[in-house]
Image: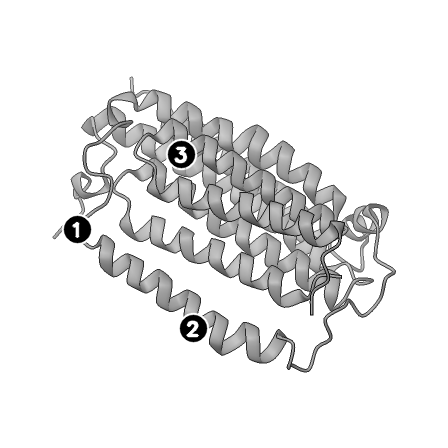
Amino acid sequence: MIPLWMYLVVAAAMFCIGVYGVLARRNAVAILMSVELMLSAVNINLIAFWRYVTPQNMSGQAFTAFVFVVAAAEAAVGLAIVISIYRSRRSVIVNDVNVLRG
Amino acid sequence: MLELNAQTIVFFIFSLLTLGGALGVVTNRNLIHGAIYLIISLFGGAGLFVLLSAPFFAAVQVLVYIGAIAILIIFAVMLTRSMTQLREVFNRQWWASALVGLLLFGLMLVGVILPVWGTGGSNADSPVSELTATTQDLGVALVDGNQYVLPFEVASLLLTAAMIGAIVIAREDD
């Protein structure tokens, strides 16, 4: 069987790619896509730990289910905000959205 | 060390899909292509779930992530069409972001994954048990009064609140 650390390396790499996307992209939709990548990496980690450490306990899978729920809610609300901002400011570049700047 | 059997090959194929898709998402200039790379990446994640004997989550990944979230993202890309092909993809601190990402990955690799879970670590390379809980166990656990019924109900409330919130936020003002 494949050792656990290989799954962890894949998930860590995916998470860090997501971090890079969140920090470096200018388009808000691309930032949301990168956040989805990070959440998906967390799911891989949770399932891998569940399989290798506590395969007969349900907590790992239950956590994964709740991460799915949160990811769906985050995507729906985030994209609604992006569309609302685009409607009022004609832009989804995060640098242009600075109404709250002091 | 790792022997080259069917499982290992499948693992490397799905890992390659996952990471290649992820790189495509963060680097691609065209957001529609980025969304398709996101679908590829999530599909690789579903394959990894199958390898980890969690077939229910593989199905959920395809249905919820690819079927709902990725399609939602594609809709958002189409609704903000004038922003799809920007000349500048990255902001000014992209090199610092790359540095942060690489440092974080190195830190996790050297600090946590290899010492604690690596070949020399305390935990074995194989699972503690070949017996795993099944999808039926998950279903029971989610509605069992002693386990996860309260978080389950809170999650459904969260989804309802998010749905109503999304409708209210995205609605045109009149």
Residue B149 visible, this orientation: no
Q: Which residue is mark 2?
A: B107
Given contact means CB atoms under 8 Å apart, are the residues at marks 3 and 2 in contact?
no
Q: Chain of mark 2?
A: B
Q: Which residue is mark 3?
A: B34
- If the image is split into quadrants, where does the N terminus of chain A sit? bottom right
Between B125 and B108, the residue placed more toward the observer is: B125
Between B140 and B111, the residue placed more toward the observer is: B111
Name the secondary structure under disc 2: helix
Residue B82 in which image quadrant? top left
Crowdedness of circle 2 by 10 Å Cα count: few (<14), some, many (20+)? Answer: few
Between B19 and A38, the residue placed more toward the observer is: B19
Q: Is residue A14 above or below residue A4?
A: above
Q: Is the same chain shared between marks 1 and 3?
A: yes
Q: Position of residue B109 (x, y in %)?
A: 49, 71
Q: Is the same chain shared between marks 2 and 1?
A: yes
